[in-house]
Amino acid sequence: MIKNVCFGLCVILMLAVSCNSGETYKISGTVEDGDGMMVYLKKEIGDKKFLVEDSVVVKNGAFVLSGKIQQVDKRVLTLGKNEQVLLLDEVPMQVTATRLVSKEGKKLDAYDLKLAGSPEQEVLKMGKQLEMSKNLISLGGMFAMVQVKDDSVKLDSTWKAMEMLKREVDKSIKNFIDSNANRMAITYVIGDFIAKEYPFEDVERYYGQLTPEVKASYPGQLLKDKIEKLRFINVGGIAPDIDLAAPDGKQVKLSSLRGKYVLLDFWASWCGPCLAEVPNVKAIYEEYKDKGFEVYGVSLDDKREAWVNAIEKHNLPWVHVSSLKGWECPVAKRYNVTGIPKMYLLDKEGRIVAMDLRGEALKEKVASFFN
């Protein structure tokens, strides 16, 4: 009898725990002129691959999505062609979708999505805004440098102005992360943004500042796993092998250059900063090519003619390879390349000894191998 009672209590407790496990979410929204439209809640399950977890039809200009998830996690809300990243937790969230209007006053098939919810969502939103600011400065700087690439004085001043703006954004990002180390959303800011745009040392440092509770959370564990993977493509790790086609169609492996010091250079024919660094790289190459130094250039061009013409026009005598898939190049993704030029210096064993050195810093580092 006592055994049966104990067993019954255990079953009840287990059911209670299972019913209360996870987080209950609720997303309420209004959509201007949106009746009949589908709203989807998606989870990313791979590189640009998503799984639809929930969906609802907009009725009378409104919708509600609700359910349970196992832990606080990031999701993507999709309405037509519009997407919004959000952090799903137990705090009710409100979405307001307003139709965009053209200059002529015509309503467009696009929406401005505004989210209101937990402080975590605000952190995610602010992180995205800082990322956009950083990217706009980089894109604007590259465009400006292409415009003045034939004027060395203007090129230098443009580069300095761009670097100054970057430093200001970097300062804002540091302060933002420092003041939100207790928020789970900051793990996505670090993992999705900082890990792509900043040195590995910065990623590790920011992770170290997180509170124990955030580190122990599901997003915290995801960030930790990502950092461990990034460790292999940073100083001290063996550079993952590359096997791509040269202009003549023959495959050339990065590992075929073992026994030499190698500059692994991600570039493209359309990249102003890449071409601005060419004279420096050529000078280094000419000085050390007969002493055991090689350059392995991986182009992110997507047109063979533009790639080959750039090699010939600028007389680039080293090893060149490309997948001709642009930013979809699998090698670029493996190396977490989100901006170019991106450079790795490898020792004779293929180990990464330095990253993103340019100008005099690159020249001095290569010289140290042979002196």
Image (cartoon, helix red, strand yellow):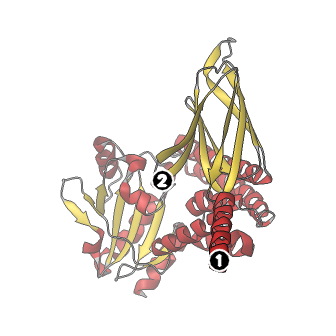
Q: Quarter holding the C terminus? A: bottom left
Q: Is residue 178 left or right of residue 41?
A: right
Depth check: give the residue in front, 4 or 297. Answer: 4
* Residue in the foreground of this view, choosing between 180 and 54: 54
Q: Which amino acid type is shown beneath numbered disc 2?
A: Ile
Helix, strand or loop for disc 2: strand
Image mark for residue 70: none
The residue at which mark 2 appears reads as: 45
Q: Which residue is mark 1?
A: 1
Please state the horizontal and vertical placement of residue 232, each as a whole percent of the image.
46, 74
Camera-near label (2 vs 1) is 1
Cα–Cα span, label 2 and label 1: 49 Å
Against 60, residue 150 (above or below) is below
Dot 1 crowding, Cα within 10 Å, few <14, some 14–19, many 20+: few
Q: How many marks?
A: 2
Given residues 214 and 128, the one toward you in this image is: 214
Residue 361, position as x, y percentages in the image: 54, 73
Q: Position of residue 201 (x, y in %)?
A: 61, 74
Residue 243: x %, y % from top left: 27, 63
* Circle nearer the N terminus (2, 1): 1
Q: Residue at x 61, y 57 (%)?
A: 193
The residue at 65%/12% (across/down) is 106
Query: Does the rendering let one see residue 17?
Result: yes
Instruction: Indicate the quadrant where residue 113 lies.
Output: top right
**Disc 1 element:** loop
Residue occupying image coordinates x 76% and y 67%: 181
